[in-house]
Image (tube, rainbow, N blue to C red):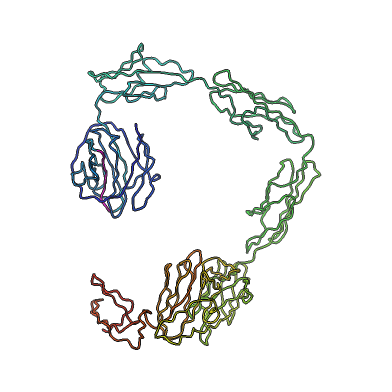
Amino acid sequence: MKKTLLKLSILALGLLTSVGVSAASTEIFSWTPTSSNVTAATGGSVAVTGVTWDNSKLGAKLGSTSAFAVLTLSSGMFEVGDVITVTMQNTSHQIGIFLYDEEATKYDYGKAPLKTSNGSGELTATFDGKDKIVIARGSGTTMYLQSLVIERPIKAPALNAFTLNGINGTIDQTAGTVTIELPYGSTEPSDAEILAACTVNSAATEPTTYDAATHTITVTDGTTPKEYVLTITYAAAKTDATLKSLSYNGTAIELAEGTYSYDVELPYGTSAIPTVAYEINDETATAVPTQASALPGTATVVVTAQDGTTELTYTVNFTVKATASTDATLKSLKAGSITVALADGQYDYDVELPAGTTEAPALSYELNDETASAVVTDATSATGAASIVVTAQDGTTEHTYNVQFSIAAAPKTLLALPFDNGVKGYIYNATPSDPNYTAHTIYVPYIGTTTPTAGAATTKEGTTSAEVAANTVTLTSSVDGSSQEYALNFVQLTPVTIDDLTTPYTHTFDGSEIGSWIYSVYGYDASKGLKFAKTTNDTNNMRDAEGKTRIVFAIPAGVTHVELTSVGNKRNIKITADGTTTNFDAADSYTFDLAGTEASLVMVESNQTGGDGGFSAITLSATSDPATGVEEAEAEVVNTYYISADGKTYNAAVKGLPLIKVEELSNGTIKTSKIMIED
């Protein structure tokens, strides 16, 4: 039967109406889906692949929360009168079977469907010869196509199957032939066995007969006979006389195609004769083994193929090594669960144990030569030494593998330390390339005359506590009680000077601002501007231990609106200002407001998992819309809105920017950024 491809697509449908038919039939296609072959495509459609018309299994989900899902089947596979049965599950939707007219350019949903049904269960319709059939379901929660069965009405007596000795024959209904190949050596079947091999359809009501002279099987309903000519052939005898595997005493011999003689050298001093074992590639072949009778000696395996003529002889020649082995090396070495990386000619190794380890692990090993011997001496303490003395088979050659244990330092790492001025300290666990920075130092930018106070620290797992006293942060390990100190280094910034706030002030960065009114350890780059990034601690780039670079701006009093212009890669960031942290998606610019009553610090942090970005310029103003240039002191009432909320009506007086920006939308709602409300 021809193979085809089922394709799911999302279409909009009208209401479904109900028309139903049914028919007695024989199943010609059954589909019980799983989800393994369903791939979601763009636009909410689903592509279904791998369908064949031989009862194969495939997954299909008719799913969309906003549209109808349609399964389209080509009519070329069906005949008039074929019955389509669809079983749905997992939701209660209206589903239907529609037709696609041969001359139509689109599905004609204006016509009544063949059949519709509400909810889960079976939906059955009879195909009437149109170009296509369409199985659809209503929109909403996903519905699964549990099974789809195509059945064909029985029209005439026919031979459905022919199975002899467990082997299925091939039936050609058009040519009226049955062909079958039986294995080599099979006996010719009797007439009774041939009749027993026949399976007929339900239209065949009379006994089936077989004419041995003409090799004809006749199926009839008492009126209309259907004849099939039977052809039986026999497979030729197999000629495979090869081995799948060959071994001695459990040790495999690597077989090579076309090679039938193998040499095996046994260890010095071997006296026991090994036993050869094998596997045959073709189970119809036979093999006769002959074991070696002495050492040195030869074992053979003679394999005869099914044809009784083809024969191969596998030979294993055993010899014994004349001198004792001098191999006193190890194949592998482990200290507990720690694997020691061995190197040729190296016998001394250092192994660092996890922090807090109190006892040294035992050594384990594998020998390169199993005839060698080894003596292990384990360490008596977690910082002691262990050894393995390996003696070769010759009793003279010897190597001593020495393992010296040490214990890793306990974790004492500070990840983040916030301060009450809204910034986080810049933490260095190692000395960066810049000589101005010192290892285990926390740099804290601030403005004014009072240094900020540290809050609760974030530490690496294994650190018990972080105590802040004076200008020192002390970390204590929960593993061994050891400690590590960080020095606090406060960096005073001076807010940028702006002479005139009546017009927006725009400053283009060139890197000279760092250390005066901007604090940034990542620096400035002409292509990226004032840079920020998300990465692990990298001393070469002076990134802090939490992995996020930060930029701190000192903004003067009177500035109520800030706009940062992005350059290069647009990155997700978060900005902390006036005690509030806001997340921003990647954009060309980032705008936010300040109270403006006094000078403030603004901290920008990376808010993503990788990559870097930067800022080319900053615009500062005393208005919520820099383009207007309106000063707050000169603002007048622009408009008045009445806002209903919480059961009250509020008179919202718009007194000029930046106090409020009110926009009345077409649907009658009001969108505000800031409002002054007088009850």
- Give above or below for 363 relative to 101: below
Q: Give the image location of residue 118, x and y in percent.
A: 22, 47
Q: Dominant secondary structure of the magenta stretch?
A: strand
Quadrant containing the N terminus in the rendered view: top left
Depth check: 402 or 285 in front? 285
Q: Give the image location of residue 503, x and y in percent.
A: 40, 83
Q: Residue at x 28, y 18 (%)?
A: 207
Which region is colored magenta? 131-139
Quadrant containing the C terminus in the rendered view: bottom left
Does residue 256 appear left or right of residue 603 in this picture? right
Does residue 220 appear left or right of residue 447 in this picture? left
Q: Give the image location of residue 534, x and y in percent.
A: 51, 67
Is 539 magenta? The answer is no
Depth check: 66 or 399 in front? 66
Depth check: 447 or 511 in front? 511
Does residue 403 appear left or right of residue 127 in this picture? right
Question: Looking at the rendering, which quadrant does residue 298 occupy?
Answer: top right
Depth check: 606 or 471 in front? 606
Is 138 magenta? The answer is yes
Q: Give the image location of residue 500, x and y in percent.
A: 43, 87
Q: Residue at x 31, y 44 (%)?
A: 145
